[in-house]
Amino acid sequence: MKQIVAAAILDSLENPTRLLTARRTAPPTVAGMWEFPGGKIEPGESCQEAVHREITEELGVSLELGSEIFGPLEPGWQLNDSAAMRVWFAEISSGTPAPLEDHDQLLWVDLDLASLEALPWIPADLPIVRAVLSEAQAGATR
């Protein structure tokens, strides 16, 4: 199974109120849908190193990673038959996010179910969205 990594970027790891979401530009099956930014691990990288690299490439920012949002499987959250994704809470430590690669728009969304579910998420990300909200409200972001 291909290992994917992503960041649930919050406005604050200490007192989160908003989540940064990214709108995909490709492939056509998910273009226009929202997701957690991230991507594939490269050979020799740890999952955390891949998160830092991917977010720098995609959004042009550096992150402070918080706790992992554990999925139901050992490799994280099932995306499809051949890929699973591990996700970490994060906060921007430097830079201003911009859609540099794979996305055409970024949006800060309030951390409440109605606001989050109002977006057309990639279907595989919806269970992660609910876990992010639950863990953020419980104060489990560090």
Image: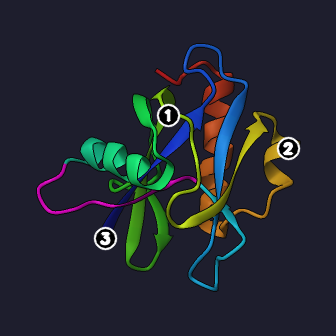
Residue type marked 3:
Lys
Any mark on residue 115, and which?
2
Majority secondary structure in the magenta region: loop
Position of 142 relative to 120 (above/below): above
Position of 14 relative to 61 (above/below): above
Check residue 2 for magenta coloring: no
Measure the C-alpha gap from mark 2 to mark 1: 19 Å
Residue type marked 2:
Ser
Within 10 angstroms of label 3, few (less than 14), some, or many (20 or more) residues?
A: few
Assign a secondary structure to mark 3: strand
Any mark on residue 7, and which?
none
Quarter-of-image position of residue 109: top right
Between 137 and 61, the residue placed more toward the observer is: 61
Residue stretch rendered in magenta on the structure: 36-45
Question: Residue at 54% of width from left, 22% of height from top?
Answer: 140
Pointer 3 residue = 2
Lateral position of residue 115 relative to residue 85, left or right: right
Lateral position of residue 109 relative to residue 142, left or right: right
Question: Residue at 60% of width from left, 31% of height from top?
Answer: 10
Give the image location of residue 138, x and y in percent: 64, 21
Measure the C-alpha gap from mark 2 to mark 3: 31 Å
State which tag comes first along the sequence, 1 or 3.
3
Lateral position of residue 50 relative to residue 27, left or right: left
State which tag comes first along the sequence, 2 or 1.
1
Answer whether labels 2 and 3 touch (C-beta < 8 Å): no
Question: Residue at 64% of width from left, 77% of height from top?
Answer: 30
Pointer 1 residue = 89
Within 10 angstroms of label 2, few (less than 14), some, or many (20 or more) residues?
A: few
Residue type marked 1:
Phe
Answer whether labels 2 and 1 touch (C-beta < 8 Å): no
